[in-house]
Image: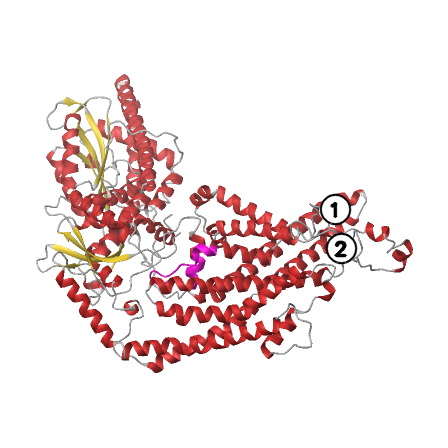
């Protein structure tokens, strides 16, 4: 956590043609710069890389269906095999993602289409009938017809109940927006080609399919165990049964031509359910005829041998289909697991092209120019990223960066970590700080939990809150992996370190208040003694019987031995006037804390004045504001401490009222009242006069000074400017002054952000300063009174805790029978539930909001403007938040 925002600079990036994509990608990985739009007048639809962004969006839409398809494939099969192996000789579908530097090439698109094809193919594998379908002229020999008859008969027997109710294509969900399926949106048709090919031609056949169809096909095949006779040549050779899934009619025509070139025997696939049902009926009839013929023939042994061999081939073929189905399901599941990585790469690709649209080309169209805001401390890393991008892009001329001067206000960058980010968010909820303005976040780490604890002070409640926050801190890695969608839980988890600090400070203030679930703890022993009242004959047994209430007299020897070492004496928990004592204590404490807090805010403003070279604001704003606050309310704090130190418990009855003295200070009266200390009246008059004199200085000082600078200081500024130009020209080794030198060697204090405009309007400056003066002077009174909320909420929290104990726990403890012991369990459960819901959640939220208001209104407005612009770097690490919104995580 830094004291103020980091120094920024405006830089120009010269990205050489051919390496601009890699350079932007490197910058996105590092998250160093924020790009400016150099084409503000160009419409988003007319920029150079619009087509690339549209393709990325199309890829996102395609990849968005992959996880759902993977889940459907995992649930869809008749049974799941724990380790499905690739079928022997089957075509392997490789699904891989290119590196981020190659995202703008063709392979990623090919992988996505292959994944879609794999999805549809897997759905087809779940169909009860997807084997080679027949027509009477498709089988030249009865042997081959019988082979496929048996395989089809076996498949139909196993799935006959499910076959007729399946549609022509796999069941796909219809898009609610477009009203069509994914296949229809892509305008393509999934087709199949099946047949036989010689074993020796398989490798060349597979290679030719891959080269010609560019991966838009899936080839599955299995060898036939026995040798078959080629009907064209009469040769006996090994054959392979294959099934080709292709995408689109043009790919189907290429597949047909390749099959013809390799002399494959093709078997057509029926187009609809009616044709498929007709084929099944004809198959059953022909199988029955073959069985009848088999019984009539004399060559019974030959027929049985043929049937047996064909049955074996059919069983092998069905096994290959099942194993292919399992393999494809496994590959699809892996592809769905890789979908997130692909989506990440497409998101990066889209972001890079969006940044490229912000750049402009030079006159030769060979170089891309970008303007970025970059922290000065990261310039070396920026140059290294450009060099690495040029190396990856094989650019002949490396890309480079040039720092340029600018009069625009840079964005604000405050580096944080997981501990300080929550407190920085509290500050930025009020407003992002101005560039190089003092940041209140480092002080908020201490003051915010402390003010919360003053209102929430309870040892028991603080321990519960601390343990809850500590559990979130210790399990933060595990909780981050869960990526919960519950907004309330995410809010609590993001503020875990704030809750931890608030709980620890509540434990401290609980010890100060000596409050633990509304009960006091006697750790060091009370400083008051009841026994001394009896020893000195002040009380007797008759006194106890005659009086319901008794008062301990500190003037009696031995009754009061001294203050409690730490916090409130526990004997006050039994006193009837406990509330009056605590009210006085907490009200004075609230005023003291408020004045110190506001004074610290005023002191921080001087660092802004000095940093922006506005020394006149130190004398004309800071000193009058501080004198006005301290002469009035600082004196009130002085009187509180003086009364605490000057009067003890023995003479407390003689102590005057501070409120009466403070009121008399303004009316300059009080001669009839006993003074708090000697010379009080004269000092009070002096302080009031100083405070009153500070008001006109605060009201008129700055406007008159600025008016003098504009009207009477022109000659002085001209002389200083002449001397500076002459000094630079006389220096032989000097160069043109940079932007930083101009800022450091300003003509006067007005080289800062409040430099005089060309036309100076005294009326406007006077009006603005009058509003500021009235707001500050009245705000000192109202803001001091606003800190009394510390006392009010602390009192409310203590009283609610006491009421909850008396109405719940005390009633459960009064039952002394055995039933009371069993009843104590639900009573304690009710007490715990009400404590968490009312005292921890509701009261904690109330104290949080009041502490937030005290920081925003009473503290930060003394020095913090909050009108800046936050630095938003181009960073790929910010992309997962976009995925969560899209539902991809």
**Residue nearer the viewer, 499 or 656:** 656
Residue at 65 percent of width and 60 percent of height: 644
SS category of the residue bearing label 1: helix
Tell me if 862 is positioned left or right of 189 in this view.
right
**Was residue 441 drawn as part of the magenta stretch in this picture?**
yes
Q: How many marks?
A: 2
Residue corresponding to mark 2: 574
Task: Give the label on residue 823, or none.
Answer: 1
| Camera-nearest residue between 245 and 117 | 117
- Residue 328: image x %, image y %? 30, 36
> What x and y, as percent, mark residue 446?
50, 54
* Magenta-tinted stretch: 425-444
* Separation of marks 1 and 2 at Cα, in angstroms: 28 Å
In the image, farthest residue toward the left: 364
Query: Against 817, is 648 above or below?
Result: below
Residue found at x 23% / y 56%: 355
Q: Is residue 207 left or right of residue 877?
A: left
Q: Which residue occupies the foreground of this view, 79 or 817? A: 817
Disc nearer the start of the sequence (1/2) = 2
Q: Is residue 51 visible?
A: yes
Picture coordinates of residue 590, whole percent (x, y): 59, 63
Residue beneath the point at 74% across and 59% down: 650
Q: Residues within 10 Å of mark 2 (few under 14, many from 20)?
A: few
Does residue 467 lie above or below 354 as drawn? above
Residue 214 position in % (x across, y down)? 17, 41
Q: Residue at x 91, y 56 (%)?
A: 542
């Amino acid at each position: 956590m830094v004291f103020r925002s980091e120094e920024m600079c405006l830089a120009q990036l010269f990205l050489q043609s051919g390496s601009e994509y890699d350079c932007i990608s490197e910058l996105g990985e590092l998250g160093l710069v924020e790009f400016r739009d150099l084409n503000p007048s160009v419409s988003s639809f007319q920029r150079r890389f619009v087509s690339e962004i549209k393709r990325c969006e199309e890829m996102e839409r395609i990849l968005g269906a992959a996880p759902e398809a993977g889940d459907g494939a995992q649930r869809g099969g008749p049974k799941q095999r724990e380790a499905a192996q690739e079928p022997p000789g089957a075509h392997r579908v490789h699904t891989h993602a290119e590196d981020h530097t190659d995202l703008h090439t063709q392979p990623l698109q090919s992988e996505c289409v292959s994944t879609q094809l794999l999805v549809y193919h897997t759905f087809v594998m779940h169909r009860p009938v997807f084997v080679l379908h027949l027509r009477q002229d498709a089988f030249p020999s009865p042997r081959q017809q019988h082979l496929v008859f048996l395989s089809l008969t076996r498949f139909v027997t196993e799935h006959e109940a499910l076959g007729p109710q399946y549609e022509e294509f796999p069941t796909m969900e219809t898009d609610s927006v477009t009203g069509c399926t994914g296949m229809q949106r892509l305008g393509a048709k999934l087709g199949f080609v099946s047949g036989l090919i010689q074993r020796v031609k398989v490798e060349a056949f597979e290679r030719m399919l891959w080269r010609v169809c560019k991966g838009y096909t899936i080839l599955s095949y299995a060898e036939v165990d026995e040798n078959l006779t080629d009907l064209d040549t009469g040769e006996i050779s090994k054959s392979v049964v294959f099934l080709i899934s292709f995408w689109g009619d043009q790919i189907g025509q290429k597949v047909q031509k390749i099959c013809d070139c390799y002399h494959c025997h093709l078997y057509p696939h029926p187009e609809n359910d009616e044709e498929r049902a007709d084929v099944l009926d004809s198959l059953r009839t022909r199988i029955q005829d073959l069985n009848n013929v088999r019984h009539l023939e004399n060559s019974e042994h030959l027929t049985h041998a043929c049937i047996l061999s064909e049955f074996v081939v059919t069983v092998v073929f069905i096994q290959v289909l099942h194993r292919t189905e399992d393999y494809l399901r496994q590959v699809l599941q892996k592809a769905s697991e890789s979908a997130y990585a692909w989506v990440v790469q497409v998101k990066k690709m889209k972001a890079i092209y969006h940044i490229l649209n912000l750049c402009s080309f030079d006159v030769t169209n060979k170089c891309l120019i970008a303007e970025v805001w970059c922290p000065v401390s990261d310039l070396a890393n920026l140059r290294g990223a450009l060099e690495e991008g040029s190396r990856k892009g094989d650019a002949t001329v490396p890309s480079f960066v040039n720092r340029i001067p600018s009069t625009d206000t840079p964005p604000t960058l405050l580096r944080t970590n997981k501990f300080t980010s929550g407190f920085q968010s509290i500050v930025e909820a009020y407003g992002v700080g101005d560039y190089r303005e003092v940041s209140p976040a480092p002080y908020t780490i201490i003051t915010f939990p402390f003010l919360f604890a003053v209102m929430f002070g309870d040892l028991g409640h603080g321990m519960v809150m601390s343990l809850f926050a500590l559990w979130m801190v210790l399990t933060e890695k595990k909780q981050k992996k869960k990526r919960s969608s519950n907004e309330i839980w995410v809010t609590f988890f993001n503020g875990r370190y704030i809750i931890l600090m608030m709980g620890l400070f509540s434990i401290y203030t609980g010890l100060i208040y000596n409050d633990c679930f509304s009960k006091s703890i006697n750790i060091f022993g009370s400083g008051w003694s009841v026994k001394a009242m009896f020893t000195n004959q002040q009380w007797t047994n008759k006194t106890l019987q005659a009086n319901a209430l008794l008062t301990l007299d500190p003037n009696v020897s031995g009754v009061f031995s001294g203050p409690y070492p730490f916090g409130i004496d526990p004997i006050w928990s039994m006193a009837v006037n406990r509330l009056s004592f605590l009210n006085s204590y907490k009200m004075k404490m609230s005023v003291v804390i408020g004045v110190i807090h506001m004074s610290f805010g005023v002191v921080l403003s001087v660092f802004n004045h000095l940093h922006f070279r506005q020394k006149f604001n130190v004398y004309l704003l800071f000193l009058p504001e501080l004198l006005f606050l301290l002469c009035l309310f600082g004196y009130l704090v002085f009187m509180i401490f003086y009364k605490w130190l000057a009067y003890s418990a023995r003479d407390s009855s003689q102590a005057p009222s501070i409120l009466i003295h403070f009121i008399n200070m303004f009316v300059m009266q009080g001669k009839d009242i006993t003074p708090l200390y000697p010379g009080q009246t004269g000092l009070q008059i002096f302080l009031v006069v100083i405070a009153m004199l500070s008001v006109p200085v605060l009201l008129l000082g700055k406007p008159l000074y600025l008016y003098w600078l504009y009207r009477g200081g022109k000659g002085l500024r001209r002389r200083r400017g002449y001397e500076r130009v002459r000094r630079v020209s006389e220096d032989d080794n000097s160069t043109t002054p940079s932007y930083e030198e101009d800022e450091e060697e300003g003509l006067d204090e007005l080289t800062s952000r409040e430099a005089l405009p060309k036309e100076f309007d005294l009326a406007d400056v006077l009006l603005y300063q009058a509003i500021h003066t009235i707001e500050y002077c009245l705000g000192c009174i109202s803001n001091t009174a606003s800190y009394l909320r510390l006392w009010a909420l602390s009192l409310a929290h203590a009283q609610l805790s006491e009421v909850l104990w008396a109405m719940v726990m005390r009633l459960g403890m009064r039952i002394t029978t055995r039933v009371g012991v069993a009843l104590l369990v639900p009573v304690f459960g009710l007490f715990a539930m009400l404590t968490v819901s009312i005292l921890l959640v509701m009261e904690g939220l109330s104290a949080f909001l009041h502490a937030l208001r005290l920081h925003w209104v009473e503290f930060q407005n003394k020095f913090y403007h909050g009108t800046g612009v936050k630095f938003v770097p181009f960073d790929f690490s910010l992309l997962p938040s976009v995925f969560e919104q899209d539902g991809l995580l």
